Image: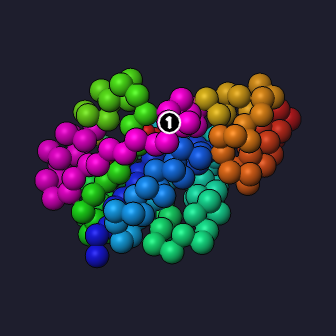
Amino acid sequence: MRTAIYPGSFDPFTNGHLDVVQRATRLFDRVIVAVAKSESKHPLFTSEERLTLVHEAIRGMPNVEADTFDGLLVEYVQRQSAQAVLRGLRAISDFEFEFQMALMNRKLNENFETIFMMPKDTYTFLSSRIVKEIARLGGDVSPFVPPHVRTALAAQLATEKT
Ligand code: PNS
């Protein structure tokens, strides 16, 4: 059983994230989308809300699960007996931080590999941060996120305004 952990803040989950999950299911028996609490990043959605959005997005994908985690990623990977951590790599600008994180994780635990996956080229410009900004400014985010995420974004941003 080959298990991969796909960690991230997923604030919120986008079509780019879904594309990486779909690609990963061809390589692994079990893929766990692991929603980090990431409280220091002051996320728009709580980790439970982000988890619900991921659950809805992966519905019907038999070998994909979703979970939340707090604390060190390496410890979560160990608890799940996973062989790999997946990260999407969109552009050179992602590389420096991702490289540092992968090598630091390897220093902390040598028993798994970090695997970088490139999402479909349509999504190389996509990020959760940009999606939130577009939604905040009243733009249409429907090409970038699943429909239920778009609805959740609109609802959440409406409460922000009140
Ligand atoms: O989607 P993000 O915010 O880029 O994801 C970053 C994430 C959550 C993967 C990273 O911050 C992480 O692994 N956090 C858990 C805490 C940890 O292990 N930190 C040391 C990383 S070297």
Q: In the image shown, does 42 or 80 lie closer to the viewer? A: 80
Q: Residue furthest front?
A: 121
Residue 89 vertical position relative to residue 85 in the rendered view, above or below: above
Q: Is residue 123 above or below residue 50?
A: above
Query: What's the amino acid at mark 1?
Result: Asp
Q: Which residues are magenta?
A: 101-129
Residue found at x 48% / y 58%: 22
Q: Residue at x 49, y 42 (%)?
A: 120
Q: Nearer the viewer, residue 153 or 123?
A: 123
| Residue 113 belongs to the span the image colors magenta | yes
**Residue 110 location in percent, x, y?**
13, 53
The residue that appears at 17% across and 53% down in the rendered structure is: 109
Is the C terminus in the top left, top right, bottom left or bottom right quadrant? top right
Number of on-image labels = 1
Q: Tell me which corner region of the image, top left, top right, bottom left or bottom right, holds residue 30.
A: bottom left
Say how the picture is coloured.
rainbow
The answer to whether one can see residue 42 in this image is no
Corner quadrant of residue 57: bottom right
Q: Residue 136 appears at what percent x and percent y?
A: 75, 29
Quadrant placement of the N terminus? bottom left
Q: Quickly name the residue at label 1.
A: 121
Q: Is 119 one of the magenta-colored residues?
A: yes
Q: Quadrant of ligand 1?
A: top left
Please name the residue shown 51% across and 75% down the image: 62
Judge from the rendering whether residue 93 lies leftward or rightward of residue 100; answer left or right: right
Name the spot of residue 42 as percent of width and height, x first.
Answer: 56, 37
Residue 144 visible: yes
Outermost residue on the right side: it is 162
